[in-house]
Image: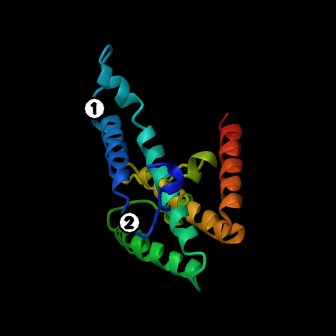
Amino acid sequence: MPLEHRPPLDFRRHIASLDGLRGLAISLVFLHHFYPRERFNPLSLVASAGWTGVDLFFVLSGFLITGILYDTLAFPRSLRTFFARRSLRIFPVYLLMVALVVVFARPLQVPLGWRDIPFFAYGANLTRVLQIDPEFGPYLRFWHLWSLAVEEQFYLLWAPLVFLLARRGRIMGACCVGIAAAILLRG
């Protein structure tokens, strides 16, 4: 079917064609974390590049979230509804984890200090940039929370921006500027 005759994507519904990309992303991440690295093994080479699975998840998430935001621009209180849904999806489990760490830190003799605050405030990705080493002790590690922090920060910045820009062309322009900035700042 020619592109001009295809109906627009409805982001409120499941997009089945993205399931294969999700499966690829999951496979890459698992290979990266669990497949042994061996010389001259092609699968080891793929496993070494498995970190790209997380990037693929971020791209898929950004695509879907932008679509959801764009599709709901005309609805009243849609930005508030968006943040309420995201909060109900992630905050309860995250806050439970934070509460358990705080409650059991003293009995388990796990040191907590000011350096741990970024982990509890969706800033785990910033600790490396700021060269802050957490004080959790040798048994607790929360480095995996960096991707959740990136996701939450994306929501906080991107959702209001989509609503401010409001037009597809402007949103695409912001995406292009963001891509260019990411490439320039990566070095």
Report the residue that reaches farthest toward the bottom: 76
The type of residue carrying mark 2 is Ala
Residue 61 lies, in percent from the top left, at 47, 56
Which mark, by number, is residue 67?
none
The dot on residue 105 is 2
Mark 2 element type: helix
Cα distance in 3D space between marks 2 and 1: 33 Å
Circle nearer the viewer, 2 or 1: 1
Secondary-structure class at tag 1: loop
The residue at the far top in this view is: 40
Q: Residue 175: horizontal and vertical position, in percent?
A: 65, 52
**Where does label 1 land, which residue?**
35
The residue drawn where x is 71% and y is 49% is 177
- Residue 49 in sight here: yes
What residue appears at the point 39 percent right and 75 percent down from the top-left corner? 92
**Of residues 159 and 6, the one drawn nearer to the viewer in this rendering:** 6
Q: How many marks?
A: 2
Horizontal and vertical percent for residue 170?
71, 60
Is residue 82 found left or right of 50 in the rendered image?
right
In the image, what residue occupies the spot 32% across and 13% down? 40
Q: In the image, residue 178 lies at what x, y percent?
A: 67, 50
Residue 113 seen in the current view: no
- Please tell me whether residue 151 is drawn above or below residue 59 in the rendered image: below
Name the residue type under label 1.
Answer: Tyr
